Amino acid sequence: MQEIQKEALVQTLENMKKRYDYLKNITAVDYPDGLEVVYVLYSTVSKEQELVKVKLPHENPNIESVVGVYPAADWHERELFEMFGIKILGRKVGRLLLEKWNGVDPPLLKSFEWGKDYRKIK
């Protein structure tokens, strides 16, 4: 497992792609002191797995897109934006995955209010 600064993310993953040729998953965790984005890399040759973690603040969380390194990151980055509110730098926001959601108050943050009717909010 590696914990890196967000500024080093793209370069670190480019270097690691020589060994880990497959991106299994990207997700995030909401901690009281901030967010943590977790990249799960896998080698189809050695069958080894590696985690890369990046810490982000709750205020204006953003991170560079890694689609140029691992094209499979596309869907995962959309989920990071929509579910955790993490802005992905270098890509446009397209159609939302959850169409009846307003794009405010990301549902996987601990601050999300369950039971609130978000469809009526504009």
Image: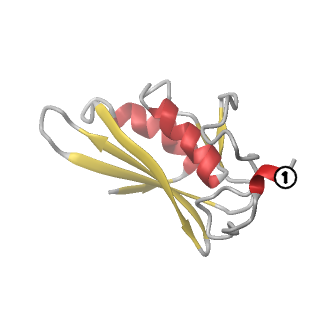
Q: Give the image location of residue 110, x and y in percent.
A: 62, 70
The amino acid marked with disc number 1 is Ile
Q: Give the image location of residue 17, x and y in percent.
A: 32, 31
Q: Nearer the viewer, residue 85 or 114?
A: 114
Q: Residue lying farthest bottom?
A: 32
Q: Give the image location of residue 122, x and y in percent.
A: 87, 47
Seen at 31% across and 42% down, the residue is 41
> Is residue 87 rendered to the left or right of residue 1?
right
Q: Quadrant of residue 32?
A: bottom right
Seen at 42% across and 40% down, the residue is 12
Kind of element beneath mark 1: loop
Does 23 sit above or below residue 26? above
Q: Which residue is mark 1?
A: 121
Q: Nearer the viewer, residue 19 or 38?
A: 38
Q: Give the image location of residue 43, x and y in percent.
A: 21, 36
Seen at 51% across and 30% down, the residue is 74
Q: Quadrant of residue 91?
A: top right
Location of the N terminus (image quadrant): bottom left
Q: Quadrant of residue 117?
A: bottom right
Seen at 60% across and 38% down, the residue is 97
Q: Residue lying farthest left?
A: 46
> Is residue 74 rendered to the left or right of residue 109?
left
Does 53 sit above or below residue 92? below
Q: How is the image coloured?
A: secondary structure
Circle 1 Cα neighbour tier, 10 Å, few/some/many (<14 / 14–19 / ≥20): few
Count the marks: how many? 1
